[in-house]
Image (cartoon, rainbow, N blue to C red):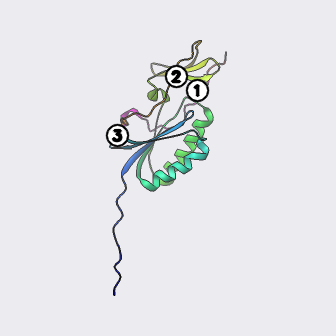
Amino acid sequence: MQKQLNLKKPMPKKKVDILLIALSSPIMIGVYQDNKLIRSIKSEEKSSDILPVLYKELFDQYDVQALFYANGPGSFMAIKVAYVFLKSLSVLKNIPLFAKDAFYFNQNQPIKALGKLFFVKVASEIKTQKLEKVPLSTLRLPDMLEYNEFSTNATPLYIIGAVG
């Protein structure tokens, strides 16, 4: 008796874009298909430990077309880790990398810098400002990814204001 082989073709992977917000804890990753958020991931783990694990899973599951991230302001170390990791993926896999400042992801609210200093965005300028009352600022993944809002200049925003 002849044995039949199951030669099903594998299902094609969904073409997606991936957005990373890793400026503070938790880190957030959004998977977007046709500009729409189809999956979100949150992790309290250190980005240097968890990003390789999460992105391996995402690349195994999806056909990644573009990488996006929040390039600051925020934790300098978190920004460095995210940039180096994503830039390496971008170069190695020949996938474009795009960036947008963090204010896009928190409705332009002040972002904690140091002590009572906060990063604020006035018009298109980002600077530090001393605030007595700590504003509640929550970063979130957008439901729709507006590609024209992002820049191909993906270098980190290292903004250091006068400490006072």
Q: Is residue 157 magenta?
A: yes
Q: Earlier in the sequence, mark 1 or mark 2?
A: 2
Q: Residue at x 44, y 49 (%)?
A: 95
The quadrant of the rendering that contains the C terminus is top right
Q: Residue at x 61, y 46 (%)?
A: 49
Asked whether 132 or 157 is in front, the reply is 132
Q: Earlier in the sequence, mark 3 or mark 1?
A: 3
The quadrant of the rendering that contains the N terminus is bottom left
The residues bearing labels 3 and 1 have C-alpha atoms spaced at a distance of 31 Å
Q: Residue at x 52, y 48 (%)?
A: 54
Q: What main secondary structure does the magenta stretch of the protein show?
A: loop
Q: Residues within 10 Å of mark 1 (few under 14, many from 20)?
A: some
- Pointer 1: what residue? 159
- Pointer 2: what residue? 126
Q: Earlier in the sequence, mark 3 or mark 2?
A: 3
In magenta, the rendered stretch is 147-160
Quadrant of the image occupied by residue 115: top right
Height in image: 109 above or below 17? above
| Residue contact at pointers 1 and 2, CB within 8 angstroms | yes
The residues bearing labels 3 and 2 have C-alpha atoms spaced at a distance of 28 Å
Q: Is 103 left or right of 76, judged from the image as shown?
A: left
